[in-house]
Image (spheres, rainbow, N blue to C red):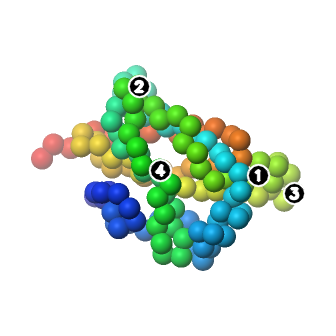
Amino acid sequence: MPFTIQGTGPSAYQEPTNGNGNVTYEQFLAQNPAIGYLKIQASRAQKAIPISNLRIVVMQEFNGLQVLFFDGKTDANGIISSIELPAPPLAGSLDPQSAKSGAVYQVYATHPDFEPARYQIEMFEGVTAILPVTPQLAREV
């Protein structure tokens, strides 16, 4: 298994993320003063069957410290709407000559019936990013 999520809090996450290197959490917040929104759509069978109760964890690492931004479960429709995350101003990404990247987060999906999955998502101010989550069924032993 590539990673495990057991409880809540930074110690529950076994695999380090590789996002913000030497940036502190305070610096990250200063660079990302706005809010972006993340919507999760979890499904299987080519998006025909929603996955309910899929645990979604959004986090990032800052100088070796893992920070938890969200921990929740999908609803009966496989949805989590409007997860608010710090994001940079959208205007900085619109200039092709000096486009700045958004805030990148690690998204982990776990459920007893599915293999754990990890995704990355880039966020910008005022934008709702939609992340389709399609974990594979767990292999029976």
Count neighbours of disc 4 (C-alpha within 10 A) and say few if under 14, some if 14 to 19, many if 20 or more: some
Q: Which mark is residue 89?
A: 1
| Residue type for callout 2 | Asn
Query: Residue 61, percent across and down?
Result: 51, 67
Judging by the rendered image, the residue that carries numbered circle 4 is 70
Residue 30: quarter of image: bottom right
Q: CA distance from mark 4 to mark 1?
A: 21 Å
Count neighbours of disc 2 (C-alpha within 10 A) and say few if under 14, some if 14 to 19, many if 20 or more: some
Left/right placement of residue 118 relative to residue 99 reads left
In the displayed structure, 70 sits above or below 127; it is below
Q: Earlier in the sequence, mark 4 or mark 2?
A: 4
| Residue type for callout 3 | Gln
Q: Residue 50: in sight, yes or no?
A: no
Count neighbours of disc 3 (C-alpha within 10 A) and say few if under 14, some if 14 to 19, many if 20 or more: few
Judging by the rendered image, the residue that carries numbered circle 2 is 77
Query: Residue 11, percent across and down?
Result: 35, 67
Query: Residue 6, percent across and down?
Result: 28, 57
Q: For marks 4 and 2, give the one nearer the viewer.
A: 4
| Residue type for callout 1 | Pro
Q: For marks 2 and 3, give the one nearer the viewer.
A: 2
Q: CA distance from mark 4 to mark 3?
A: 34 Å
Judging by the rendered image, the residue that carries numbered circle 3 is 97
Q: Residue at x 68, y 40 (%)?
A: 127
Q: Residue at x 71, y 51 (%)?
A: 34
